[in-house]
Image (cartoon, rainbow, N blue to C red):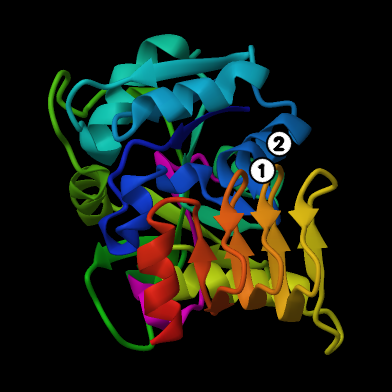
């Protein structure tokens, strides 16, 4: 298996947080999401692995320092989901390529999706599931027949797909290209299949509410909420922790601070006496953050 993680986007729905850190580096349970995705690929024996970047690219590059076997692809201009894959083709062999968005948390069996693609001899295989909020892929039998639909024949695209290198070579080289535009044409020719992955945990962290809800799901087990605190985080005296939450590596929570259902990023400082509820505490613009959470 060989793969690319698409990590170049701006994450506009997550601003102002993505002005500080690219979405693939948002911590999930105190680990960068990108590292979690790479670990999933590594556990499948995946090589080569490519990660592209554009927005806050130096942070992505630094985050890959502990992954020497990963090829880093910097893009001076946004190339889109298709253009990025086309640029990376020289890194890959003639085997199918697994493509994965870098802004999702999932427990999908990647081996199963890849194997389904190989056995089906599709040009492209999309991992789809029933998820009404995002259902816009139309299917007929074992084929994807179109995009942009709504109705009983529509499923949701997980952002995970497998494509043949020869098919990816149809993407114009050297500029922006949205890969769904290619898939629309291939679907008309009956050349796009799909693999159902219903029942697998999958969450898009596209908004602050989505990001916090993911943590709630992961931290509240059997009705008992929990706080995950990094070993080197410093918690002051008379701090109140309610509900669920995370305090990342190197973070400092000041005396008498109150935190409820919140995520404190690595290196962030929670000011003494401050109150944060349903918050993402980044360590940047803390005074503004405190006023927002108090008022």
Rendered residue at 32%/87% (across/down): 151
Q: In which image quadrant can residue 157 be found? A: bottom left
Return the mark for residue 36: 1
260 within the magenta span? no
Distance (Cα) linking label 2 and label 1: 5 Å
Q: Is residue 214 left or right of residue 175?
A: right
Q: In which image quadrant can residue 88 be found? A: top left
- Percent position of residue 180, x then y: 25, 50
Q: Is residue 166 above or below residue 34?
A: above
Range of residues picked out in magenta: 119-136
Q: Is residue 179 left or right of residue 216?
A: left
Return the mark for residue 39: 2
Q: Is residue 130 above or below residue 87?
A: below
**Quadrant holding the N terminus:** top right
Q: Is residue 202 left or right of residue 121?
A: right
- Percent position of residue 118, x then y: 58, 37
Determine whether label 2 and label 1 are within 8 Å by CB: yes
Examine the rendering and report whether any part of residue 197 can be seen.
Answer: no
Examine the rendering and report whether any part of residue 30 can be seen.
Answer: yes
Q: In which image quadrant can residue 107 be found? A: bottom right
Q: Is residue 173 left or right of residue 52?
A: left
Q: In this rendered view, identify the residue nearer to me: 14 or 99.
A: 14
Return the mark for residue 184: none
Give the tally of numbered discs. 2
Q: In this rendered view, identify the residue nearer to me: 91 or 263.
A: 263
Q: In this rendered view, identify the residue nearer to me: 219 or 157.
A: 219
- Percent position of residue 260, x then y: 65, 80
Asked which secondary structure carries label 1, the reply is helix
């Amino acid at each position: 298996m060989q793969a690319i993680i698409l990590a170049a986007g701006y994450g506009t729905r997550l601003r102002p947080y993505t002005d500080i850190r690219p979405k693939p580096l948002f911590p999930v349970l105190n680990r960068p999401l990108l590292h979690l995705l790479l670990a999933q690929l590594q556990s499948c024996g995946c090589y080569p692995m490519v990660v592209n970047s554009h927005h806050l690219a130096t942070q992505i590059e630094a985050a890959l320092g502990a992954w020497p076997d990963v090829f880093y692809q910097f893009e001076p201009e946004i190339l889109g989901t298709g253009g990025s894959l086309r640029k990376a083709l020289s890194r890959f062999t003639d085997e199918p390529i697994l493509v994965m968005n870098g802004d999702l948390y999932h427990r999908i069996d990647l081996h199963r999706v890849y194997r389904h693609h190989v056995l089906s001899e599709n040009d492209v295989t999309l991992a789809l599931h029933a998820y009404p909020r995002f259902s816009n892929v139309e299917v007929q039998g074992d084929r994807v027949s179109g995009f942009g639909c709504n109705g009983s024949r529509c499923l949701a695209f997980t952002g995970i797909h497998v494509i043949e290198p020869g098919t990816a070579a149809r993407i114009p080289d050297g500029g922006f290209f949205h890969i769904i535009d290619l898939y629309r044409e291939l679907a008309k020719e009956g050349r796009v299949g799909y693999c159902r992955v219903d029942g697998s945990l999958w969450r898009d962290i596209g908004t602050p509410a989505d990001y916090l809800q993911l943590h709630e799901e992961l931290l509240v087990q059997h009705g008992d909420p929990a706080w995950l605190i990094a070993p080197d985080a410093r918690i002051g005296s008379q701090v109140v922790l309610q509900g669920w939450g995370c305090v990342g590596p190197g973070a400092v929570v000041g005396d008498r601070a109150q935190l409820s259902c919140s995520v404190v990023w690595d290196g962030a400082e929670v000011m003494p006496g401050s109150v944060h509820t349903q918050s993402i505490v980044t360590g940047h613009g803390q005074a503004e953050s405190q006023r927002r959470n108090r008022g």
